[in-house]
Image: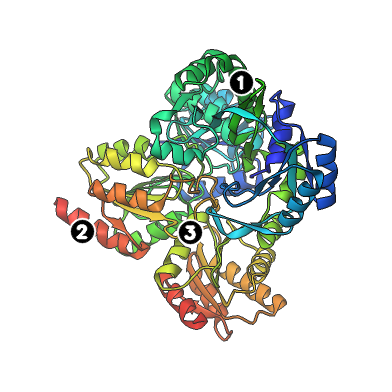
Amino acid sequence: MAVLIDRNTRVLVQGITGREGEFHTRQMLDYGTQIVAGVTPGKGGQEVLGVPVFDTVKQAVAATGADASVIFVPAPFAPDAVLEAADAGIRLIVCITEGIPVQDMVKTVALVRQKGVRLIGPNCPGMMTAGQCKIGIMPGNIFAPGPVGLVSRSGTLTYEIVDLLTKAGLGQSTCIGIGGDPVLGSTFVDLLPLFDEDPDTRAVVLVGEIGGSDEEIAAEYIRTMRKPVIGFISGRTAPPGKRMGHAGAIISGRTGTPQAKVDALRSAGVPVADALYEIPELVKQALANRT
Amino acid sequence: MKIHEYQAKEVLARYGVAVPRGRVASTPEEARVIAQELGGRVVVKAQVHAGGRGKAGGIRLADTPEQAEQHARALIGSRLVTPQAPQGVPVHKVLVEEALSIAQEYYLGITLDRAKQRDVVMVSAMGGMDIEQVAEEHPDAIVKVWVEPWQGLMPYQARQALYDAGIAREAVSTATRFLLALYKAYVGSDASLAEINPFVLTTDGHPLAADAKLNIDDNALFRHPEFGEYKEESEEDPIEAEAHRRGIQYVRLGGDIGIIGNGAGLVMSTLDEVSRAGGKPANFLDIGGGAKADLVRNALEIVLMDPNVKGVLFNVFGGITRGDEVAKGILEGIRSLQVKVPIVIRLAGTRAEEGLALLQGTELIPAVTMQEAARKIVEVTR
């Protein structure tokens, strides 16, 4: 089952002929992902790593039945690529691109939500269903199949946590990097219900950071969940008013503070790890409590 | 990117927002000349990004051009200490403007509502105050309307907000025009915040933007060449300015332990871990994915520009990036820079063991976990 993607997912790569696009297409193929098509306007008819390239997403979907898309298109063109995929009937779009103007994302996210299309990202590492399907740029070798779901605003930090989980004998169901931007296609609260419904997931790790109030909103939803959630918030010592790398990681006035997030999660009954290495133990405890 | 008040007023004026007569000055003499041209009472305003300028003495009234010159002399080159910037921010320029005789003050603002994923327009009859403070003490005094993304702010929404906020009835039609112009400026500049605070009505009935604030979305700067000249002045810290010129994500934090890592979340967590171990991070620096020797060298050079740095911690989790490549890059960087402070390196993930093996026999201090790395760097810099 897993969340959103599995071994049957048919993936299309937008921007497949670019350096990043081709490199990560190879990595995804190596992981066993079914990459069925690529799209680069003007390069239709070519092949990249044995994958047929089309001029438009519409053509690619018609020819290959692709149902998910991953976007490696430069920021000025990425919103158009997202909308093209949404218009062509793709049900899941994963946008890796960093640096898209916020106003473009406000419009793009409003439209994909209205169409009922699921967008992950932008400015994200993508997603993985361990042992089955990798869409994006996460390093496949650190994952192992198992019962822990993970949803995170960070990239490398997610790898770090997955590595800790795997080494502690805790495999993963699906891991989703939702991205570091202020306006995202899917927020925690959009995805937590899917993990709660997924029979392969028995506990969820939520990795938040400073900026915005998505963690606080998620905390309210977690009260209604059947499955345990373990939290981690990075940027606990970040100063206000400074953007910490991610466009969305900034404490603005009184919103976005780490303490508000930790407090909201804890008051919803979520164990929040103060340090990364505590996460596997908290997951083990949560799993033991439920069985 | 934060731009200065005088720059924000330049932008707003292009969109038809009326602003007080005045000009920016870099020297006391210029300030006197501008005051002379304007005639009458003027106000001399320090151009800094920190809020709470007025209370900190950054806004001064002058009755004569000589007095304007004196105020400018006191401000330019000084550091303005405000509640938001206790360490003080340097003043390089002052805005000299006609002093206004104010009858009414209001607040008009537009920003992104992250939770609702759309822009929110805010209006309040409590103008001239810090809006965060108004929000806390008098939340009912702020009226909000949300903008439909593909539609934009409609005139009726602006009117509705202004009437609901209790703006004087005779001022609503001009305020509507201002609010719509402010929205156009916000969209047209790819702003993340646009504020007129206060929007004033003078005693002789003129509507003006007495103060203005505009923050620009950094991601959108590629399509705004007109802001190129504002960019340099937006920097307040010389090391941050140099890092950004080299395309490096660096934030100065004031401690003495330099931090370099890959990925924003991982670097933030590294800062947290060093703080937990009793250390004070000097900076945030993210080298991103696929670090090459040149980037590592640049990063290290930037971190060491801060004279307070007593040691550096590298924390790299190799995903698709390989640990041995990173180790080679770090070694090359250190050799070419002749580093004298202790360096702790924590490598994990892909080919980390090979990477750590390369570091054996060097003066670099290896660490396996983040915790161990944080503890070691705190120990050696104590």
Dot 3 alpha-carbon crowd within 10 angstroms: few under 14, some 14 to 19, many 20 or more: many
How many numbered dots are placed on residues in this image? 3
Residue A52 x, y percent position in the rendering: 59, 34
Residue type for callout 3: Met
Between A242 and B214, which is closer to the camera in this rendering? B214
Pointer 2 residue: A285
Dot 2 alpha-carbon crowd within 10 angstroms: few under 14, some 14 to 19, many 20 or more: few
The answer to whether B245 is drawn above or below residue B14 in the figure is below
**Mark 2 or 1, which is nearer the eye?**
1
Whole-angstrom CA distance, mark 3 to mark 2, is 26 Å
Between A248 and B35, which is closer to the camera in this rendering? B35
Between A161 and B214, which is closer to the camera in this rendering? B214
The reply to whether dot 3 and dot 1 touch (C-beta < 8 Å) is: no
Residue type for callout 2: Gln
Whether labels 3 and 1 belong to a single chain: the reply is yes
Is residue A242 in view?
yes
The reply to whether dot 2 and dot 1 touch (C-beta < 8 Å) is: no
Residue A205 x, y percent position in the rendering: 32, 51
Mark 1 element type:
helix
Q: Which mark is residue B106?
A: none
Residue B356 x, y percent position in the rendering: 52, 76
Chain under callout 1: B
Chain under callout 2: A
Pointer 3 residue: B268
**Mark 3 or 2, which is nearer the eye?**
3
N-terminal of the pair, mark 3 or mark 1, is: 1
Whole-angstrom CA distance, mark 2 to mark 1, is 55 Å
Q: In the drawing, does residue B48 fall left or right of residue A279?
A: right
The reply to whether dot 3 and dot 2 touch (C-beta < 8 Å) is: no
Pointer 1 residue: B180
Dot 1 alpha-carbon crowd within 10 angstroms: few under 14, some 14 to 19, many 20 or more: many
Residue B131 x, y percent position in the rendering: 49, 37
